[in-house]
Image: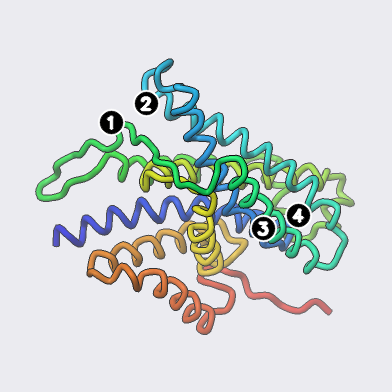
Amino acid sequence: MEQFFQQLLNGLAVGGIYALVALGYTMVYGVLKLINFAHGDLFTIGAYLGLTLLVSCNLSGMLPLPVAVLAVFVMVALLVALIGFLLERAAYRPLRDAPRISALISAIAVSFFIESLAVVVFTGQPRPVLQPEWLVSEWQVGGLRILRLTAFVPAMTAVLVGILLYIVYRTKPGLAMRAISKDIETTRLLGVRVDNIIAFTFCMGSALAAASGIMWALRYPQVHPYMGIMPGLKAFIAAVFGGIGSIPGAVVGAFLIGLCEEIIKGLGQSTFSDAFTFALLIIVLCVKPTGLFGEKVTDKV
């Protein structure tokens, strides 16, 4: 039983990381009906920038370590949000009126470009990440050993998701985002600056991917140029599993996948965990093609 609860906690931590990336996928799809396959690579950029700021710039020596880690989260999120804005402006906005397949191909090209650039800048050699001692210390609760990092990741995820929900449902940009997701042309006619709102959506999604990249690097202390591929794919599966375009669906799908993966690993079947994730997606789509929380799509006449 203790082993089960241990894996349950690990699943919450992994699911929290997947959730932040999945939210970026679902937000961009919600406003543009575009799958941004470069999103997993923004995850990688966030991890590298976090490592650079925390170690190479010795930020942890200038500030108390907990403050330094939080400062790194904020700075990296802002930097990657800027990168997301530039990508939207350069690679996606010129194709706004092109066939949807053109934007999809552009997203794949951007993904390969970022990965290749990361190899050139950072080299292909994996780099270790120094885990802050206060995050890898343990709490003993009965027979459970809980790393502070295991509790930190879901807590940070909850804070970021709460901020996102407030923006989406309690602010004017959020109202505009929801309107664009329903009818972009009518929203434009109502005077909303659609291009600015779409760029803002990319910035928010990119910032969430950056935060998840840092947490992944802290949990699995190694970074390399292709580290975002598998987490990005699993986060995309989580978004589709929950109903792509649905914020609650992305979060629920991510946590379910994280929990299932860690429980399977706890049973000694770690090599099967990835296959299970993809098999689960197939089963869910066969039963409910729009995902758990997806809206039924009707053809417009």
Q: Which mark is residue 36?
A: 3
Secondary structure category for the residue under label 2: helix
Q: Residues within 10 Å of mark 3 (few under 14, many from 20)?
A: many
| Vertical position of residue 259 compared to residue 190: above or below | below
Q: Which mark is residue 66?
A: 2
Q: Residues within 10 Å of mark 4 (few under 14, many from 20)?
A: many
Q: Disc 3 or 2, which lies upstream in sequence?
A: 3
Q: Which mark is residue 180?
A: 4
Q: Nearer the viewer, mark 4 or mark 3?
A: 3
**Real-space CA distance between mark 4 and mark 1, rounded to the nearest whole angstrom:** 43 Å
Q: Which mark is residue 77?
A: none
| Vertical position of residue 179 compared to residue 147: above or below | below
Q: Circle 1 is placed at which residue position?
A: 134
| Vertical position of residue 89 compared to residue 297: above or below | above
Q: Disc 4 or 3, which lies upstream in sequence?
A: 3
State the image coordinates of residue 223 (x, y, percent, origin top left): 46, 45
Q: Disc 3 or 1, which lies upstream in sequence?
A: 3
**Real-space CA distance between mark 3 and mark 1, rounded to the nearest whole angstrom:** 35 Å
Q: Answer yes or no: do the residues labelled 3 and 2 have beta carbons within 8 Å? A: no
State the image coordinates of residue 61 (x, y, percent, origin top left): 40, 18
Residue type indicated by callout 1 = Trp
Q: Quadrant of residue 109?
A: bottom right
Q: Answer yes or no: do the residues labelled 1 and 2 have beta carbons within 8 Å? A: yes
Residue type indicated by callout 2 = Pro
- The mark tally for this picture is 4
| Vertical position of residue 33 compared to residue 120: above or below | below
